[in-house]
Amino acid sequence: MRILIAEDNQNVAQEVAKGLRDASHDVELANDGRSAIALVETNTYDVIVMDVMMPVMDGYTAVQHIRRQNITTPVIMLTARGEVEDRVRGLDCGADDYLTKPFSMVELLARIRALGRRQRGDASPTICLRDLVLDIATRTARRGARKIELTNREFALLEFLMSSSPTPVSKAAILEHVWDQHFESASNIVNVYIRHLREKLEVNNEPTLLHTVRGVGFVMK
Amino acid sequence: MVLWFTLGVLAITAVFSLVTYLNLYEELHEKKVGLEYPDHPDWRLHGNSSDEEIQDIMNELMEAALVYALPLLAIVIIIGYFLAGKSLKPIKELNLQMAKVTESNLREPIHSSVCDPDFESLRQHLNALLERLAKSIEDIREYAAQVAHELRTPLTILRLKVEQSYRQIDPELQEELQDELHRLTQMVDQSLLLARAGRGALVWNDARLNASALVDELVEDFTLLAAESDRALSGDISSGCIVMADRMHVKQILHGLFANALKHGDGKIGIRLCPRSRVGEVHFLIVNHQVDASDSNLAGLGLGLRVADSLIQLQTRIRFQRHVGKQYYAARLILPMADS
């Protein structure tokens, strides 16, 4: 995918760009809202990653301007402001998604993939990994012919791990994606859920799907 | 105002009637009746009204006064009501408009349909006050946003760098760094929230909330966490308890209570969610058994409970009670039930 990153902090911009390039995306950078608009008006992007607080022109104004030009490229807002009213303002301006700093690269990649799928009208209701099938629409999981009973939280966790596969996912990224709010995350809750999920996914010596990557987190492969 | 007007008119009428009554009474007693005889112009018969006659006259006067008093009273009330309504109309207008003022429409000016200079001056002062309030809230928001930006941007850089250099860092160190970064992020979030609460910049958005589903969701997590530390979490959650509250804030308060219960004590944790329809409330009770009553953190010195306290103070309809027993700690959160 061709992605534009509009971010005034060079360190953040470089790290995000590196993460996206590692995931085989084509990345361009803009320092402020006005430069981003100029680039968007002259090039075609699949996704725009836009910071909110930028000099010259902030992210909200830039997205409004882009939408007024009838450019429908999906926009993910990156911001340090995590309050509900800020999110609402961002989405009202025309953004498609909203990610609060600090964020995990895996989380950003997952959101970019989701937006890309939505843009292509390719919202497949199932995710498959070997003999494991997750049906998003009916919220059911099967391994081969065996139906797996999952709670809502376990389902969300499995969905995140499967959609990120084969990239390993850190505990912090899981906490933010599955538990949504930072206050909710107790330090060992992820390990507890992963253990329960393993017990449900791998019975009777079935091949291991959910692996621990030391120092990184977990991966489904 | 109608009452004051009515009392005023009635008092004036009463004083006037009393004076008239006394004056007439005096005059009748003193006035001499003179009869003249046409055939004898120098003859003149003088005399007074008798006491009975005077009393009859006065009684008639009283009766007439009482007969006219009721219609007079009604007229006075009607006129008073009309005048009061007219005079209070601009106040009612202002009141209605002020009641609709929320954080999101502070800059919408207050209007008045009358040109009275006093009301116009009041309207202008109210608009100036709202403008200053809006500016002050904006300043607080801007400051909070700036602080959040300054704190979260380096955290973002650190986190992205740690994630991307996982092949070069020892796995154990990597895991430790990630955990610490996450903990730091949580602390920054909670500190920013406390700062916003302290400056009165937190907003409580009331909406219908299924408290039973919310508690169930938290129970799922905390039952697993309790089992990890060989403790049992059990309870009685009535289904369909709908309250009026801000979902995120209530979730944060409940999370703080669950986390606190798990952090302290060794025994079982009991919870209960039940409606009290008669008083229009839903009660959430959490009892933590086998706790050390001398533990000073129990009563809430931790950041999590401070946040919960600040959130509870945002909304007067939410109450929080706690009790430290000899071997247990109980906390009760009382939420307003939503109208059916």
Image: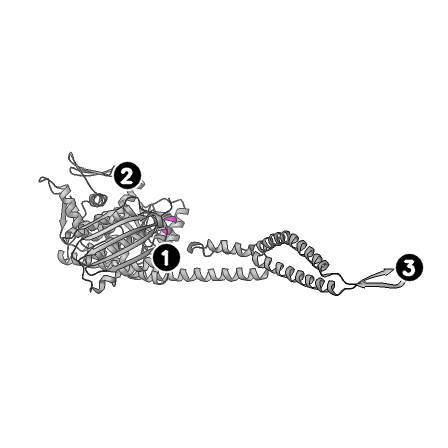
Q: Which residue corresponds to mark 1?
A: B316
Q: Amino acid at mark 3?
A: Asp
Residue denoted by label 3: B39
Circles 3, 2 touching at the beta carbon (< 8 Å)? no
Which one is nearer the viewer's eye here, A52 or B127?
A: B127
Q: Residues within 10 Å of mark 3 (few under 14, many from 20)?
A: few
Q: Chain of mark 2?
A: A
Looking at the rendering, which quadrant does residue B42 occupy?
A: bottom right
Residue name at image x 70 percent, y 56 percent: B56
Q: Residue at x 40, y 44 (%)?
A: A70
Q: Secondary structure at mark 1?
A: loop
What chain does mark 3 sit on?
B
Q: Main secondary structure of the magenta part?
A: helix
- Front residue (pair B145, B289): B289
Q: Which residues are magenta?
A: A89-93
Left or right of A215 on screen, residue B338: right
Q: Locate residue B130, reporting x and y percent.
A: 47, 60
